[in-house]
Image: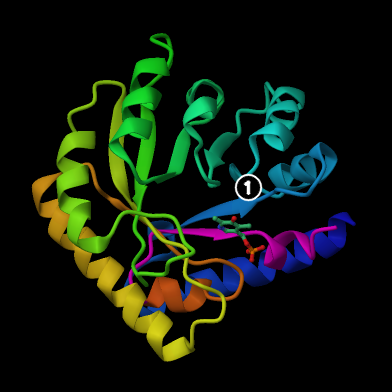
């Protein structure tokens, strides 16, 4: 298992570096978040031994025992799923990053519930850039107003924007949406200097996302293979 993992990871890193170069940046400008949902702690340990540090999980119930089992490995955990209002406390306590914030109420709860011993929680605002009825996220026109409110919350650091494009979206439309995300993040960063992150790109589209300016890609299948 470990050598297949090493081979896949090597290939992903090579492609990340090539796409970063194509966008005129160094590979250090792109953070690789390994999406470990559906995979056991032993697999995550193997990935950490290969140098991965950032791990993404979508389901709280699945994530919490894994995070506990791997406590002491100094991994950085990203919550990339939908944040439900009644689950914010556990998210605020156990993760370093939350990518899917799309409502002020959720941000307020995360800020209030972040432990005072812990560093501020890094958050990205999820933008429904494709204006897809089925996808979560704040409308692009409302992202600026939400960012202004979230930036004031004491226990959060507003790090940037995140998007999740519909799988069936044609490549040209997806690229257009990615460029819109990059533009929106650039505009908002002029007002909020902490917004250094664009969380965009998964196994199917991370190279295009990096070429469009993504700084953080969330890759599961291409690193770990198919989920059970
Ligand atoms: C599952 C998931 C990913 C990773 O998907 P892959 O196609 O396996 O790379 C990335 N982002 C989010 C929000 C996810 O839920």
| Quadrant of residue 130 within the rendered picture | bottom left
Q: Which residue is mark 1?
A: 52
Q: Is residue 221 above or below residue 65?
A: below
Q: Range of the magenta residues?
A: 212-228
Residue at (78%, 64%) from the top-left corner?
225
| Quadrant of residue 178 within the rendered picture | bottom left
Label 1 crowd bin: few (<14), some (14–19), many (20+), radius 10 Å: some
Q: Position of residue 51 (x, y in %)?
A: 65, 47
Q: Is residue 91 visible?
A: no
44 with respect to 15 (left or right): right
Residue nearest the observer in this picture, 47 or 84: 84
Q: Position of residue 161 (x, y in %)?
A: 32, 53
Report the image quarter containing ligand 1: bottom right
Furthest toward the right, the residue is 1
Q: Is residue 112 located in the magenta-colored stretch of the structure?
A: no
Residue at (38%, 55%) from the top-left corner?
137
Image quadrant holding the C terminus, namely bottom right
Residue at (56%, 81%) from the top-left corner?
168
195 with respect to 72 (left or right): left
Furthest toward the top, the residue is 117
Q: Is residue 137 visible?
A: yes
């Amino acid at each position: 298992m470990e050598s297949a993992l090493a081979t896949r990871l090597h290939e992903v890193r090579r492609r990340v570096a090539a796409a970063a170069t194509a966008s005129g940046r160094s590979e250090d400008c792109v953070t690789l978040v390994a999406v470990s949902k559906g995979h056991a702690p032993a697999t995550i340990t193997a990935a950490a031994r290969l140098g991965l540090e950032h791990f993404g999980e979508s389901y709280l119930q699945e994530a919490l025992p894994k995070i506990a089992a791997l406590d002491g490995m100094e991994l950085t955990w990203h919550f990339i799923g939908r944040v439900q209002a009644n689950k914010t406390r556990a998210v605020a306590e156990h993760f370093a990053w939350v990518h899917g914030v799309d409502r002020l109420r959720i941000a307020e709860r995360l800020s209030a519930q972040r432990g005072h011993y812990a560093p501020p929680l890094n958050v990205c605002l999820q933008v429904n850039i494709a204006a897809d009825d089925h996808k979560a996220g704040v409308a692009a026109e409302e992202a600026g107003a939400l960012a202004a409110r979230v930036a004031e919350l004491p226990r959060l650091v507003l790090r940037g924007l995140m998007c999740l494009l519909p799988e069936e979206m044609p490549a040209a439309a997806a690229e257009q949406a990615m460029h819109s995300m990059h533009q929106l993040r650039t505009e908002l960063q002029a007002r909020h200097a902490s917004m250094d992150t664009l969380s965009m790109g998964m196994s199917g589209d991370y190279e295009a996302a990096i070429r469009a300016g993504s700084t953080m890609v969330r890759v599961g299948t291409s690193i770990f293979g198919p989920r059970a």
